[in-house]
Image (cartoon, rainbow, N blue to C red):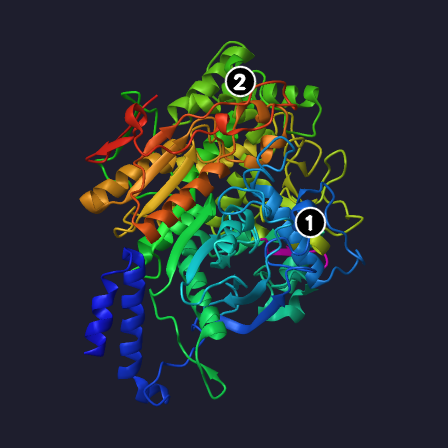
Amino acid sequence: MKRFARFQRLHTLPRTAALGALALLAAATLAACHGDDDDNGGGPPSNSLPSFVSGSVSSQTYDGQSDDLLTAGLGKTGLASATAPSIANPAAPTAAELRRLAIYSNYRALVDMSANGGYGRFWGPNIDLNGNDTLGEGKIAGKEYIAYADDGSGTQNVSLLVQIPASFNPDQPCIVTATSSGSRGVYGAISAAGEWGLKRGCAVAYTDKGSGNGAHELATNRVTLIDGTLANADLAGTRAIFKANASAQALSSFNSAFPNRYAYKHAHSQQNPEKDWGKNTLQAIQFAYWALNDMFGPVSGSTHQVRYGKGSITTIAASVSNGGGASLAAAEQDTDGWITAVVVGEPQINLNLPSQVSVRQGGAPVGSFGRPLADYMTLANLLQPCAALAPAAAGAPYLTTLPVATTTAIRTARCATLAASGLISGGNTVAQANDALNQLHQAGYETDSDKLHAPMWDSQAVPAVAVTYADAYMKASVLDNLCDFSFGTTSAAGAAGVTPIVSPMLTIFGNGNGVPPTNGINLVYNSGTAGAADHRLATPDASYAGAACLRALWTNGNATMVGNVNAIRVNANLRGKPAIIVQGRADALVPINHASRPYLGANQVAEGNKSQLSLYEITNGQHFDAFLSVAGFDTRFIPVHYYNIQALDLMWNHLKNNAPLPPSQVVRTVARGGTAGAAPALTTANLPPIATDPGANAITVSGGVVNVPN
């Protein structure tokens, strides 16, 4: 009768609270049934570490004053400073100093920190959940757990980290995931999702998803450990985040031929880590459950017991870019009910595309849709330098340290080589550039992205991703120098092989992003005109032959690459979970026609009427909010992060109060305009809300056909 009365009371609770209570009741009942097995006298089972956790678990409590979860003690002011936190002994940074540097650099890497942007006014440690400036420096006290997930080999070593704020309410538990974006380390989504979760009083489950910022300095044989400190690779053994899989003799020969090179985990682990990003996100959630039971579970003798059973905690899988794709993959793989809902931004996702899916904009078919990253990134890497000279791309923001004359010469030479190779047509440079740009349009890049092709390539975002992912999909060793590319230090003039004055390894955990160029390690083309050099300067046409080689791996149907790309594809079946995707229409790194739009169509095919997915497409939105502090970005583009926050708020209201999610729509923002580099302050006039009734701005999907208004 007591259980029946408890069940009756569930009907008075909001939907997700009732589901959580049911899960707790089920966990308690299950524990009672198995009490004899756990030797707890019929009580809850013991809180055992998940089997995938390898080695020891470290934990640290932060007081919220000298140090904290969100800002590492820097506060809102310290994060805003253009000066990175100092290191007392630069030759031997401590783990605490590296953690502080990692939080500082990763926070700033994903959001607009500019004076007239949204930091400190629309988001930031000082902004409360109602959007008001009430939290001061915004430091958040709490406890942090960190450990590796591994398969027993000691070669995967996926970093898992859980932050539990002091404000966590054990009677109303929640978890937010913050899987790293890009190839960043474990703090790689702290501003994208971690901040929102911590302010909600939720535990935040982080993972570097097995691609994060693990480096091996081959010349010195040093590697990074889980806390960022360094060790000799041989002595580190299975404690290394990553070390190259090569014999001492092979490395010695390689170092002689290619001095001062670096192996990177995402590129050179030979494990195609992307195939496990969904699993890693689910592991982070399970590790968070363990940590919460460790803190709040009842104690029997010296043993913590399970308070939170599987599925009993409201859990939002959230992150951006690669972390967003990982969250979607996790939700698709979640057959056990760990994830309650999904909110992601600009997800990098590769689809098994149903034949019914198509994408239309303004009633007309888009040029292409649903291509995998291996296809569109290698194409962009070939064509973007030339397309940047098209009149439609004129006035693009300048995002390179190279002189204008050098950049122009590179672009012109790339056009000429493309034309000579028969890949573009045109009797002069302008005609060739127009054709290159038109080919990008035909390949699914929006015209909204025209002025972004120059900065995406000049900043080396596209070349670095093209090389890293080709290495990953080919399961290449660092010894392979795939397509004659490697990662190494270079001189001021671009020559490779120079011994660094200060090793990048000392601060790679804090400053690195996992994909060179980063922290002084650059993308090198080994077959340069005058020897190995920075890929932009190695040949007059910026290492065209290497870029063409990367492209050919896909277009020629290399079996290894195709097989490993197929291994990462997803099916867009979110199993009925409420979900939101936010993406900028002008995204030139992960084009919306190859990501969010076809995913919406494939989800409708997979789930039919059970689908609870909404897509919010943001005009004047592009991939890198951190670039909004750059002249020309500030006047043209708005922060997509603002809508990621709004989407999380909408989902929270849906889960806790049964408020309906707004339908899929185009959100028409207003660019700030003004003078490049001095755009007027961002206001809500630039940022209309996601509409409850989008009217003519509605994105519709029927039978897998996605229709997006112009």
584 sits left or right of 489 in the view: left
Q: Nearer the viewer, residue 598 or 343?
A: 343
Q: Which residues are magenta?
A: 213-221
Q: Residues within 10 Å of mark 2 (few under 14, many from 20)?
A: many
Q: Looking at numbered disc 2 in the image, what kind of residue is underneath it?
A: Ala
Residue 554 position in % (x across, y down):
41, 38
Does dot 1 land on a helix, a strand or a loop? helix
In percent of the image, x 31 and y 42: which residue is there? 661
- Mark 1 neighbour density, 10 Å: few (under 14) some (14–19) many (20 or more): few
Confirm whether the magenta stretch covers residue 219. Answer: yes
Vertical comparison of 131 with 212: above or below: above
Q: Are marks 2 and 1 in contact (CB under 8 Å)?
A: no
Q: What label does residue 257 carry, if any?
A: 1
Return the x and y of residue 269 as percentages of the image width and height. 52, 56
| Percent x, y of residue 89 | 81, 58
Indicate whether 330 appears above or below 153.
Answer: above
- By secondary structure, the bulk of the magenta-drawn segment is best described as loop
